Image (tube, helix red, strand yellow):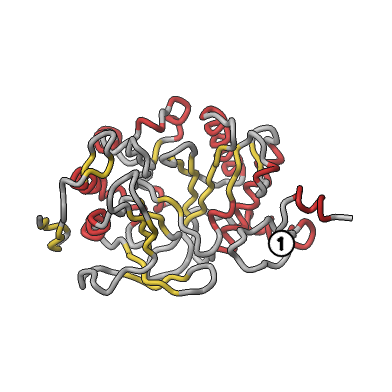
Amino acid sequence: MIREIAGRSVKITSPDKVYFPKIGITKLDVIDYFGEVAPALLRTLGRRPVLLQRFPGGVGGNNFFQKRIPDSAPDWIQTTTVETVNGTPSRALVLADEAHLVWAANQGAFVLHAWPFRVPGADVDELRIDLDPGPGVGWSQIVEAAHATRELLAASGISSWVKSSGSKGLHVYVPTTGGLDSYAVRGAAVTVARRLAAAHPELCTDRWWKEERGSRVFVDFNQNAPHKTVFGAWTIRPRVGAQVSTPVEWEEIDSLDPNSLTVLTVPERLRSRGDAWRDMYESPQDIGELIDEWRDGLERIGDAPWPPVYPKMPHEPPRVAPSRARKDGP
């Protein structure tokens, strides 16, 4: 099957292949979904490099991350060179238009993990606050943590936007002004996490080690670390119900059922309610206060822990779990 999309002839193979067996969603259904949400999706993911997570046999089968677009891809496919944490370069897909989105979906890549910048530049243009539920944390606690995040940012004159994660959490986004790199934006996220943990110690935690988090919402600052990708808005989680990570209005989240936001329901929702993030990137926010607070605290209280795949960073605490440190101590 050939479809003409954005001036390109895009080949679709095995359109009847079932991607989501429990609800009978086929490859063509996924491609049609992306066609319906493409304008909204490209507002937030357009011109970004994306890491493809491919499910060639659909959900429930084998999957893998494709870090490098092969030379056999169509000659119109746009790519850019990105680096892994250890500096290894790779050729990533750039979501230049709807044709690129459909090409990816035809590869089984309905899961798109986006970098926080748009080519041809390299400045980070968004702060991403991932509210991750710990064991025993319910949806109401996630919602409460999201409101607390919004209020904390607003107290510094910073507007924010929210989306469902497509799973159990919420993601709070802040479009940022130019000239920032991932180190600075991660520092702003560390400040947000520390402030939330101090103001709401029973609800939120900034503890990197899982053994210290308890039944609280973890504010995952390291989602902003250099070369880190995040699950993209409007893309589809590899869950049996084909849930979608969906931008929503702040006023909705108290009554929101995130499991109801699926490939089957989101297109009509978008038609009837519009895109909650439509104007987000037209309102970049100054997060300098958050960055300055992180920098000012480096010598005094140190940096927050980095993931183990990263090189040892200045001012970082020892990379050892607290329980292990106690066993190994004097």
**Residue 269 at what x, y percent from top left?**
28, 34
Q: Residue at x 76, y 48 (%)?
A: 323
Q: Residue furthest top?
A: 255
**For residue 259, which quarter of the picture?**
top left
Along the line of sight, the residue nearer the viewer: 100 or 294? 100
Q: Residue at x 28, y 69 (%)?
A: 78
Residue 12 relative to residue 283: left or right: left
**Residue 213 at what x, y percent from top left?**
67, 40
How packed is label 1: few (under 14 Cα within 10 Å), some, or many (20 or more)? some
Residue 37 relative to residue 127: left or right: left
**For residue 32, which quarter of the picture?**
top left
**Residue 280 at what x, y percent from top left?**
40, 48
Amino acid at circle 1: Glu
Q: Quadrant of the C terminus?
A: bottom right
The residue where tag 1 is placed is 316
**Residue 233 at what x, y percent from top left?**
38, 47
**For residue 74, which quarter of the picture?**
bottom left
Residue 275 relative to residue 297: left or right: left
Q: Residue furthest right?
A: 330
